[in-house]
Every structure is written in structure tokens, then in C-alpha cells.
Amino acid sequence: MTTTTHGSFIIERRYNASPERIFAAWADPKAKRAWFAEGEGWDIRSYELDFRERGTETSTFRVAGGNNPFPPNTTFSNDTVFNEIIANERIVFTYSMARDGMRFSISLATVELHAADKGTRFILTEHGAFFDGADGVKMREQGWQELLGKLDEYLAKAN
Amino acid sequence: MTKLAHTTIVMERTYNASAARVFAAWADVEARKRWSAPADGIRIEYEEADFREGGRDVSRCIEPGNADYVATVTYIDIRKDERIVFAEDVTHGGKRVSAALISMALTPQVSATHLALTLQIASFDEAGMEQGYQFGWNAALDNLAKEFAQ
């Protein structure tokens, strides 16, 4: 018998970049790969982004050392479908994650961009279903905190 | 642009049927047409039905005097007799009104089956779809009991 736990979280933060620049960093495959997929300790096996409604984003990444908490060669995959896209304002997507081929979570996430103070008020809301051995909602929220920090660094560098 | 509203709704029922029978009533589109219509005068028509992981259903909820609700379901995770997880996008009169992640989990009990339905909803029309989901799924889960009534 499997157990499923459900949870939700909201991350709100401010970026100095405009909504247009943040949106572009989600829409452009090169940009998205740079802040979302690439990272120390990860070997990106594949990355594809087709950023349009009903389009998909798929990535596969393998543990390759660094400060990674997972055993060597553990392979994760992310399969995303975009439900709704409003340029410079909103992105809604559904994604599932698997570890070594075993699906462990399915989520619905929304990103909202609001122009504020020469920058952007950014709101990510995620609802998830986490299966057996899942990393759970706390780890997921922490993962997004790190990714959104990487997005900030990417935007600063690309400036 | 309309504001997003987020909500989670949990519904539970216990049915006098095996988990296999309850699961079959979800897997079979003909059974689903019977129990998923929430009220007399409302009917559900399927334009596409493909119950498998990665498969898609497109159904139309038709109520006289109201624009159709069209639901596009993508099945993400299916474990026979145990659980179904799917994403659902709904439009009303052609306008997108919500995106939801829906999971249904079955737990066998002594000569019965417990069903837990978790609806995680991002609604694009303020709280309108939250009420729609409450009404629609509560009625549907009550109807489902009738599938096992003999």
C-alpha cells in the first residue's frame, strides 16, 4: 500500500529585474537551463524546453559529486507541462519528479509576476502530492528557495 | 488580469465495494458518465477518453442555460486499485477558469473501501471554481455510491 501526503507552500520574493526579464529567464531554454538545471554536483543528462501552453519541459540530471546529499549516480528526472502562460504576468505548470525511474511527486505550481518598485514582486505557489519515500513539501520548498536564489544570481550576471 | 485563488479541498467517502470495483468505476468512462454528472439536467459528454498514464480525457459538462464547462484531464500516475493522480484544466465558455491537481486514493477496509479525494486548485476566477469543485465533486462522490447499490 502506498501513502500519499499533500502539501502546499508559497514563496514570495522581490527581484530587482523587471517582470519582462524574469519572464524571459523562464521562457528561453538557454536561460532557464542556466539557473534551473545547471548546478555544482549535477551532471545534466538532458534538458529540453518547449515553452508554450501544453508544451513540455523535460530534464534528467545525475549526481556527480559536490555537496550533493544523494548517493553517486542517483538520477532524477523532471517532466513538466505548461497549463497556462500569460507573457510577463503568469506561468502555471504541472510537473512530476522521479528518482531512478520511480515517480515520487506530482505538483501544480503557479508563478505570478507583479511590477513593483522598479523591480518585481514574485510569488510562487505550489501544491504537491508526495508519494512513498518522497522528499516532502519542506524539502521541495527549500529546493525552490535555492533555485530562486540562483535565478537572482543569473539575472545579476546577465545584467 | 484576474487574480489567482489557491485552495485545497479534501473529501472522503466509504463505499460498500472492493477497491477493485471502486477503481473500475473511475477507469471505465461509461461508468464515469453516470456518476460524475452532479445533478439532474446536467450531463457529461466525452470528446476524448484515454485512461492510462500520459493519456487525456476531454469532457464537456452541459447544463441548459449555462455555457459549457470543458475539462481536460491528463493522467499522470495510475496504480490499479490504489490511486489515480491527474491534472485538470477547466474552461467555461472558452475562458480558462482553473488548473487543478487531483488525487484519489483507495484504502481497503473490512468489506468496504475508503476513498480520499484531494483537490488542489488554482482558480483564475477568484473563488468561483472552488465552489464549483465543492458542489460538483461532492455530488459525484455521492452518486458513485449508487454504482455499488446492488
Image (cartoon, rainbow, N blue to C red):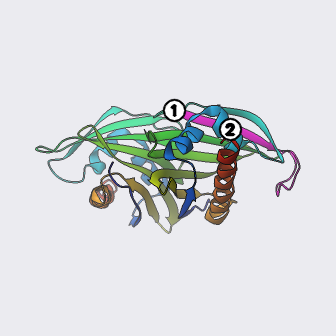
Q: Residue furthest left?
A: B65
Residue drawn at x 55%, y 59% is A14
The amino acid on which the numbered mark 1 sits, given as a three-letter code, is Gly
Residue A33's x, y, as percent?
Answer: 68, 38
Chain at numbered mark 1: A
Q: Magenta includes A70?
A: yes
Front position in the image: A107 or A104:
A107
Front position in the image: B21 or B96:
B96
Q: Mark 2 points at which residue?
A: A33
Residue drawn at x 27%, y 46% is B34
Question: What's drawn in magenta, residue-wise?
Answer: A55-73
Residue B7's x, y, as percent?
Answer: 41, 62
* Other-residue count near label 2 (Cα within 10 Å), few / some / many at <14 / 14–19 / ≥20: some
Q: Name the residue under label 1.
A: A55
Q: Which residue lies furthest to the front in this view?
A: A118
Q: Quadrant of residue B13?
A: bottom left
Q: Magenta includes B111?
A: no
* Dot 1 or dot 2, earlier in sequence: 2
Chain at numbered mark 2: A
User: Does residue A41 lie above or below A87 as drawn?
Assistant: below
Same chain for labels 1 and 2? Say yes or no. yes
